[in-house]
Amino acid sequence: MKLVIVTPRATEKAYRLVTSQNTYVFDVPTNVNKNEIKAAVEAQFEGVKVANVTTLVQNGKSVRYSRGKNRYPGTTNRQDTKKAYVTLSEGSIKVFEQEEVKEEKK
């Protein structure tokens, strides 16, 4: 088994999915499949059981750039990214919980 690191996405849509459907959104490498994502999530977050994994590849956007003063314009593409929507059957992951910060007044 290869080492796969999944990082949760903290967006408004991801927060809505967590609260309504217990589905978490992760950024994953583009060369991993659903079985590897499931194993990585269960290994990285303890006490979690994955019920379903849905993936999508988001194409990198085209970006314009300049090579000199308006003379040689060019375009390039950003990297493709892969997202995984992971539905949990047991457990939860602390993504959106904030720690309380106590401020001292002087």
Image: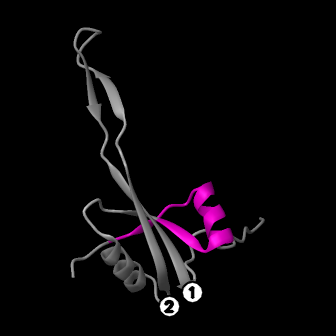
- The answer to whether mark 2 and mark 1 are in CB contact below 8 A is yes
- On the question of residue 98 being in view, the answer is no
**Which residue is tagged 1?**
91
Q: Is residue 105 left or right of residue 73?
A: right
Q: Residue furthest bottom?
A: 47
**In this rendering, would 20 be left or right of 94?**
right
58 is higher (above) or lower (below) than 31: above
Q: Kindly state the secondary structure of the residue where label 2 is placed.
A: loop
Task: Tell me where residue 1 appears, x and y as whole percent.
Answer: 21, 82
The disc, 2 or 1, on the residue closer to the chain's N-terminal end is 2
Q: Residue at x 68, y 69 (%)?
A: 20
Which three-letter amino acid code belongs to the residue tagged 2? Gly
Within 10 Å of disc 2 (Cα), the crowding (few <14, some 14-19, many 20+) is few
96 or 21, which lies in front? 21
In this rendering, position of residue 84 left or right of residue 68: right
Tell me the kind of residue under disc 1: Gly
**Crowd class of label 1 (few under 14; some 14 to 19; many from 20; radius 10 Å):** few
Confirm whether the magenta stretch covers residue 20. yes
Q: Which residue is rendered at x = 31% and y = 76% of the image? A: 36
Q: Is residue 57 magenta?
A: no
Q: What's the magenta region?
A: 5-25
Left of 60 or right of it: where is 12?
A: right
Q: Which mark is residue 47?
A: 2
Residue 86, compared with residue 29, is above or below; it is below
76 or 20, which is in the foreground? 20
Color encoding of the figure: one colour
